[in-house]
């Protein structure tokens, strides 16, 4: 196991998986690849969220280039924070991709020539999992290399 790809986002589930993946990489003296996928943002016609009635933080007048710049900045900051917290002294390769999260993780695993993928999951079940889909499940089903899915239950 020489290269481990860790999928991250801004959730506590991904942070838990990153910690686990970095600990594993330290033990194996493996290189780490960090991947963050930016999914396209579809801006609503109105400036309120349908489900909550609250104002959205996205300015409806903001153009897509500006929005992508903001997402890039957030991705860089997130990756830097994870590296600072868990990756001191390690060889780390960063990936920020755009598009579908699961397919992006699989693509980056091939680009990085990873031996394993580490991703987090939020342990959803039933109708919630069906409606929300599962990035972890898609990656497990379509990856050509082992995938370590690190579960996270609230209360950790």
Image (cartoon, grey):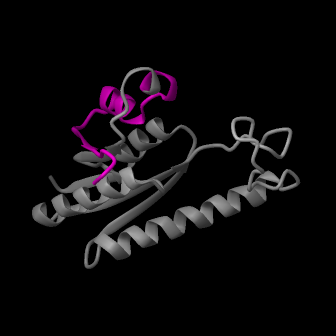
Residue 83 point in image, percent of width and height: 36, 71
Front-most of 67 and 10?
10
Tell me where residue 42 sits by quadrant. top right
Front-most of 104 and 21?
21
Residue 71 point in image, percent of width and height: 63, 58
Residue 50 point in image, percent of width and height: 75, 35
Give me the residue at 42% from left, 26% from top. 129
- The residue furthest left is 27
Judge left or right: residue 133 versus residue 44.
Answer: left
Front-most of 142 and 85?
85
Give me the residue at 30% from left, 44% from top. 153
Q: Which residues are magenta?
A: 129-156
Judge left or right: residue 82 versus residue 90.
Answer: right
Tell me where residue 57 sits by quadrant. bottom right
- The residue furthest bottom is 89
Give me the residue at 42% from left, 31% from top. 134
Tell me where residue 127 sits by quadrant. top left
130 drawn magenta: yes
């Amino acid at each position: 196991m020489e290269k481990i790809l860790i999928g991250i986002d801004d959730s506590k589930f991904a942070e838990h998986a990153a910690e686990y993946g970095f600990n594993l990489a330290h033990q194996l003296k493996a290189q780490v690849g960090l991947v963050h996928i930016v999914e396209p943002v579809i801006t609503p016609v109105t400036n309120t969220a349908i489900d909550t009635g609250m104002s959205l933080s996205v300015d409806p007048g903001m153009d897509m280039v500006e929005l992508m710049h903001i997402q890039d900045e957030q991705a860089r900051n997130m990756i830097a924070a994870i590296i600072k917290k868990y990756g001191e002294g390690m060889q780390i390769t960063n990936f920020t991709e755009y598009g579908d999260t699961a397919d992006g993780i699989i693509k980056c695993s091939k680009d990085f020539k990873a031996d394993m993928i580490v991703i987090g999951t939020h342990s959803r079940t039933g109708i919630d999992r069906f409606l929300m889909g599962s990035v972890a499940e898609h990656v497990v089903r379509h990856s050509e290399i082992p995938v370590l899915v690190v579960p996270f239950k609230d209360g950790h």
